[in-house]
Amino acid sequence: MKTVLLLCLLLAATTATHAADKKPKAMRLKGDVILTDDFKSEKLDEKWVYAKGEEAAKYEIVDGTLLMDQAGSKGAVLWRAFDAPVQDASIQLLVKPWACMWIAFGFYTPGDRPGAQRKVNIAVTQNGAVVVRDVDGVKVLKSAATRIPASEWERVTFESKGDKITVQVNDQQVLEIKTELTVGPKAGILLNLYGGKGNVAEIEVKRLK
């Protein structure tokens, strides 16, 4: 009896681990690829920029994913510039906010301080929500509940075309909103984590036609 119970517990644990590691398939989005990173190399690509120092956030490549750790900082922030600014674009990536409050991502506009050049971003929270946020105004523009556990991978897309934002999660559209905040040139992508640790993987950015 004890042997059967032990086997059942091991099977349940294996199944849960497999579910947490399973990555939703990539979505087919239109456009030309202008940036991609699968985090398969041993070290983070030098094109990613972030603060350094003893109290800075930590970034590590682990099993083909980027582990972001807020550590002693107020948040983990890193960004990467495009070769040239674009007007309309989409971001597709995998996120797992397993031990943080949220992971956010979005575009920044041309300027010397990418962190201060953001107008709107998409946040994926630990409690199963996706949120479109006004960064400067520090307010939620629109949100949707996905109820996906924080321990599972989510494939999220953020499409910005003209004044329209469309957000998909695991190949299902969950949000659509029009706002002037998303209009204008986009110089790069910025990732932001708050409240602990989380993982990001398979980033792809496309220029929309």
Image (cartoon, grey):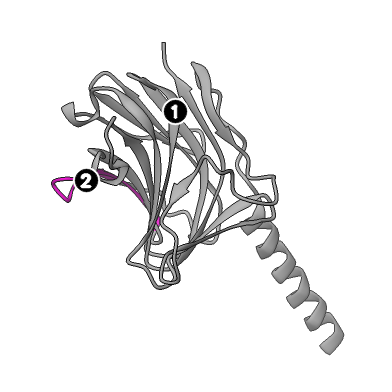
Q: Compared to 194, does 34 lie above or below?
A: above
Secondary structure state at the residue bearing disc 2: loop
Badge 2: residue crowd in 10 Å (few <14, some 14–19, many ≥20) = some
Say which residue label 1 marks. Answer: 82
Of all residues shown, which one is farthest toward the left?
Answer: 137
Q: Amino acid at mark 2?
A: Val
Residues in magenta?
128-143
- Give percent across and percent down for residue 201: 57, 46
Quadrant placement of the C terminus: top left
Q: Is residue 1 visible?
A: no
Say which residue label 2 marks. Answer: 135
Q: Compared to 10, does 20 lie above or below?
A: above
- Does 89 sit left or right of 7 as displayed? left
Give the quarter of the image for residue 185: top left
Q: Residue at x 24, y 29 (%)?
A: 182
Quadrant placement of the N terminus: bottom right
Q: Residue at x 41, y 71 (%)?
A: 55
